[in-house]
Every structure is written in C-alpha cells, then in structure tokens.
Image (cartoon, grey):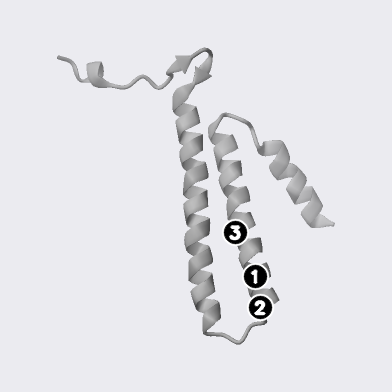
Amino acid sequence: MRSNEWRIPRKVNIAGIDILQLIEAATALAAAYVIARIVSRVLNRMFEKTPFPENAKEGIGKILRYAIYIVGTLIAVSLLGVDLTPLTLSMTKVRRF
C-alpha cells in the first residue's frame, strides 16, 4: 500500500456543496461561541471583585461578547471561501476619518 491511498480527499462535494468547508465554518462558529462564553464568565468573576457600576459591567460584557461573535463569523465566512479583502480595505478607510 502506498501512503497516499489513505488520504482523505480535500474536496467532498454533495449536491455541489463542499462538506469539509461547512464543517470547518461550523467549528469556527462553535469555537467563537464557546470562547465568548468563557470570556464572559471570567469577566463576570473579575467584575465581582471591583466596584464597577452594574450597567458598565453588562455593557463591557456585551461588547466583548459581540466582538468575539463578529470575529468568529468573519473567520467562518473566510473558511467558506469568501474573499474578505474588500471589507478589510473599507475598514481601513473608515479608520482614517
């Protein structure tokens, strides 16, 4: 047996959809969700020890959670093969103003 006989093909298409890319994207979304939950819990424990106002604690937690969700979504979209270069370029233009 040759070593390349056991390799999994990179493209597994069913009805024109690459299943491996979908699995990678779903894994990225799941990882972003888990990371956001962990960061949220750590942040809540950290805020219990500080005299922050309750609204500030909630606001910081939500902003951080949504930022992680957005990054995870962008990674998942990128794994699906979508070119995010125009989005990146537009964000640098916004940042300059």
18 in relation to 52, above or below: above
Q: Is residue 49 above or below residue 3?
A: below
Mark 3: amino acid: Arg
Q: Position of residue 56 (x, y in %)?
A: 68, 75
Residue to which mark 3 is pinned = 65
Direction from residue 27 to residue 74 in the image, left or right: right
**Badge 1 vs badge 2, beta-carbon distance below 8 Å:** yes
Mark 1 sits on what residue? 58
Residue 72, image x, y percentages: 56, 47
Amino acid type shown at disc 2: Glu
Q: CA distance from mark 3 to mark 1?
A: 10 Å
Place of residue 20 in the rendered image (x, y in percent of width and height, measured from the top left): 44, 27
Q: Is residue 81 left or right of residue 23?
A: right
Q: Are marks 3 and 1 in contact (CB under 8 Å)?
A: no
Residue 64 falls in image quadrant: bottom right
Q: Secondary structure at mark 1?
A: helix
The crowd level at tag 3 (other Cα within 10 Å; few <14, some 14-19, many 20+) is some
- Looking at numbered disc 1 in the image, what kind of residue is underneath it? Glu
Residue found at the far left of this picture: 1
